[in-house]
Image (cartoon, rainbow, N blue to C red):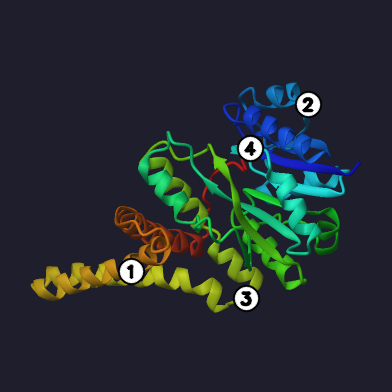
Amino acid sequence: MSRVSVVIPMFNEARHIGRTLLAAQKAANAAGIDCELIVVDNGSSDDGPQIARAFGAQVLLMPGLLIGALRNRGASVASGEWLAFIDADIEMPEEWLSQLFALETHAQGDIFGLDLHTPAAAPWYASAWQRRMLRPTNHATRTVDWLPSANLLMRKRWFDDVGGFNETLRTGEDKEYTLRLSKQGARLLSVNKSIALHWGYEMNWREWMGKELWRQSSHLQLLRTHGASLRLLRFPLLSLLVWVLDFLAILALLVGFAQLAGIMLVLTLLPSLVLSVRQSIKHRNVRLTLQLWGLHWLRLHLASAAFILSLCHWNARRPARG
């Protein structure tokens, strides 16, 4: 029987890890495949490691490592023909593995990831932010250049051939890794025939903004690793443009040019509007468009702040939790 090794990085996820492990095991049972559960703990102070062991997982205690290193340590002890990376707060659907194995059997892809959504209890901003990545159900699969690592599935030979995750990146290690896979000829497939649930949604605005500031702190490292390409430069430059327009609006207001200040402020709203329409038009939901407009406006300001802080060698302090 084939085996899938499921690698889960974790930090203080006692609330979610049991659900995550149980769902992964159920998916393996439904697919008729042996399942090896590997939890790589980053120094949790809660009962997460004990709960993981109770669910039959092998727990590796690896405090102080970045997220890429945690995933690599888990992969290094994996014995399965298949390798899956999922975050500790992700509930995979029961048909997860059987569905993706079928796609690989029919040569539709090599590296797979399911779309994510939040549970019904999530606040509107967490739900809207996750929903922006969802596609209509009539587009069940889509070939992409990179995949997020909230859930990734591949044959282990791809991991061995391409090498592991970059262990120096605080965040963005999933994009860097899957871009490398794509360059090596792997076909990356985003699938939404079934949806995985993200239980680690942001509970309040402070948490949402903190996570976005942390996520955006990877842009400078990605540019240093992959070089200055339009793909990697366009969002940091767009966010910096918004900050410049903000500054010009304030300056115009201080010197008495209120009309010019108003024009500048309107211009600061346009990039976030374009981004929100681009991501929500497929849903045909005006309310979602307006929600994403405000969230993208905030995100652009946080991204420029994170980029400038990175230039000043500031590190966003956040444990690698998966």
Tag 1–tag 3 contact (CB < 8 Å):
no
Residue assigned mark 2: 56
- Compared to 259, does 199 lie above or below? above
Residue pictured at 62% horizontal, 43% vertical: 320
Separation of residues labelled 1 and 4 (CA atoms): 35 Å
Residue pictured at 48% horizontal, 40% vertical: 201
SS assignment at label 1: helix
Q: Is residue 300 visible?
A: yes
Separation of residues labelled 4 and 3 (CA atoms): 32 Å
Instruction: Inspect the image, locate mark 4, and give the three-letter code of the amino acid beneath it.
Output: Ala
Instruction: Choose the circle earlier in sequence order: 3 or 2.
Output: 2
Separation of residues labelled 3 and 2 (CA atoms): 43 Å
Residue assigned mark 1: 242
Residue assigned mark 4: 88
Residue pictured at 40% horizontal, 71% vertical: 238
Q: In the image, which disc is placed on residue 281? A: none
